[in-house]
């Protein structure tokens, strides 16, 4: 099985011991991405909409580095710091992740660096 680490400077660098993405066989697994500025790692925006938009742009950069796009997403896992942001988050999410993949969305106590949302994806590459 072919395995390959995916990295792009167009998405934030990992803030821990992990890769932005990993291809294993016919699948790409992205690490959770949040609304961080790829240039300096700072949190982008104060609202869930602003951060969700940056999160999706970060994921888009990783997908492009792997030679794919959002139409191939088969599973998304979404984390929110506050479930009251669910509707606003979905308003941004659905503009990018158009394939209507299987999805889990949960609220968590906190997210790294105080971000409001995080998304990880599984993408079929064929």
Image (cartoon, helix red, strand yellow):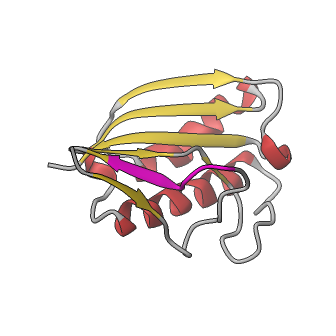
Relative to the observer, which residue lies in front, 81 or 88? 81
Relative to the observer, which residue lies in front, 83 or 119? 119
- Quick check: is 114 in the magenta stretch? no
Which residue lies at the image location 50% right of the left edge and 71% below the top edge? Answer: 8
Which residue lies at the image location 34% right of the left edge and 50% below the top edge? Answer: 23
Q: Position of residue 121 (x, y in %)?
A: 44, 41
The outermost residue toward the front is 1
Q: Is residue 56 above or below residue 80?
A: below
Which residue lies at the image location 38% right of the left edge and 68% below the top edge? Answer: 65
Relative to the observer, which residue lies in front, 22 or 91? 22
Q: Position of residue 84 (x, y in %)?
A: 74, 26
* Residue 106 figure quarter: top right
Lateral position of residue 99 relative to residue 88, left or right: left
Q: Is residue 91 above or below residue 102?
A: below
Which residue lies at the image location 82% right of the left edge and 24% below the top edge? Answer: 109
* Residue 73 figure quarter: top left
Lateral position of residue 65 relative to residue 93, left or right: left
- Quadrant (top left, top right, bottom left, bottom right) of the N terminus: top left
Q: Position of residue 108 (x, y in %)?
A: 75, 24
Lateral position of residue 95 relative to residue 53, left or right: left
Q: How many marks?
A: 0
- Quick check: is 18 in the magenta stretch? yes
Relative to the observer, which residue lies in front, 119 or 19? 19
Stretch in magenta: 17-23
């Amino acid at each position: 099985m072919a395995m390959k680490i995916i990295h792009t400077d167009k998405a934030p660098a990992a803030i821990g011991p992990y890769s932005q993405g990993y291809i294993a066989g016919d699948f790409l697994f992205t690490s959770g991405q949040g609304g961080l500025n790829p240039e300096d790692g700072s949190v982008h925006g104060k609202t869930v909409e602003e951060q969700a938009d940056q999160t999706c742009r970060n994921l888009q950069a990783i997908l492009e580095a792997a030679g794919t796009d959002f139409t191939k997403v088969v599973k998304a896992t979404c984390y929110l710091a506050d479930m009251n942001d669910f509707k606003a988050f979905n308003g941004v999410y659905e503009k990018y992740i158009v394939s209507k993949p299987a999805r889990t969305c949960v609220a968590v106590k906190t997210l790294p660096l105080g971000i409001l949302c995080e998304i990880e994806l599984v993408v079929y590459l064929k």
